Image (cartoon, helix red, strand yellow):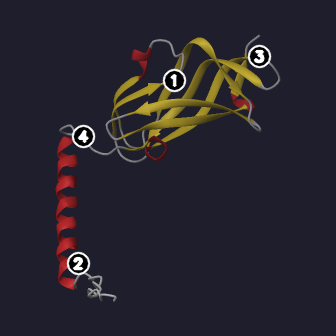
Amino acid sequence: MKTKRSKRPKKSKKVPSKEILAIMLIAFSIVAVIVGIIVYQQLPKGSKIKKDANEYFQFLNASALAKRASEKVIRINYLFFKLVPVGGDAHHVVIFAEGMANPENYYYSEIKNGTEQNVEIQFFSPIQSVKQGDVYPIKIRIRSDEAEGYVTLYLKEENIIFSP
């Protein structure tokens, strides 16, 4: 004779009520705010999020003194351009370029908004630039209290003085 096993009622999957979902959402929001405050407090005092150098500065009249290494390659000895802050006054401006001589010469304590600052970079050993289309690109890095980033200057053939 077979014995009947009692069937257990199937457990229904409980769907959280709207009140529980609301409490979970509030709890998650509070945790997110606390994490945001902690991250903000970890930033050094007086630091702020800097703008991109390509937007904060204009780079005008890029030219160079260079030697031609081949038909598409030049070796740059000197780089010239005008640096103009357009996003506001620029403070503690530092310019870096690979292979530059006397890096301490490329610091400017303040450049007023809209004012042109002539920059002349001498390279300790010439840096190479490979022609792309009709320009020779050269990458520099600029940093100030307000902005920082890498910037590519494009040298046109007519703005390059070739030495023998």
Assess whether mark 1 and mark 3 are in contact (beta carbons under 8 angstroms): no
23 up-or-down from 52: above or below: below
Residue type highlighted by circle 1: Ala
Assess whether mark 2 and mark 1 are in contact (beta carbons under 8 angstroms): no
Q: Residues within 10 Å of mark 4 (few under 14, many from 20)?
A: few
Q: Earlier in the sequence, mark 1 or mark 2?
A: 2
Q: Nearer the viewer, mark 3 or mark 2?
A: 2
- SS at mark 2 in the image: helix
Q: Earlier in the sequence, mark 4 or mark 2?
A: 2
Q: What residue is shown at x 57% (from left), y 25% (from top)?
A: 80
Q: What residue is shown at x 24% (from left), y 40% (from top)?
A: 47
**Residue 65 picture location, percent across and down:** 66, 19
Name the disc covering residue 57, or none.
none
Q: CA distance from mark 1 to mark 2?
A: 55 Å
Q: Earlier in the sequence, mark 4 or mark 3?
A: 4
Q: Earlier in the sequence, mark 3 or mark 1?
A: 3
Residue type highlighted by circle 4: Ser
Q: Earlier in the sequence, mark 4 or mark 1?
A: 4
Q: Residues within 10 Å of mark 1 (few under 14, many from 20)?
A: some
Residue highlighted by disc 2:
21
Q: What residue is shown at x 53% (from left), y 38% (from top)?
A: 59
**Residue 113 picture location, percent across and down:** 38, 43
Residue highlighted by disc 3:
69
Name the disc covering residue 97, or none.
1
Residue type highlighted by circle 2: Leu
Viewer-side residue, 70 vs 162: 70
Furthest residue toward right = 71
Q: Image quadrant for the N terminus?
A: bottom left
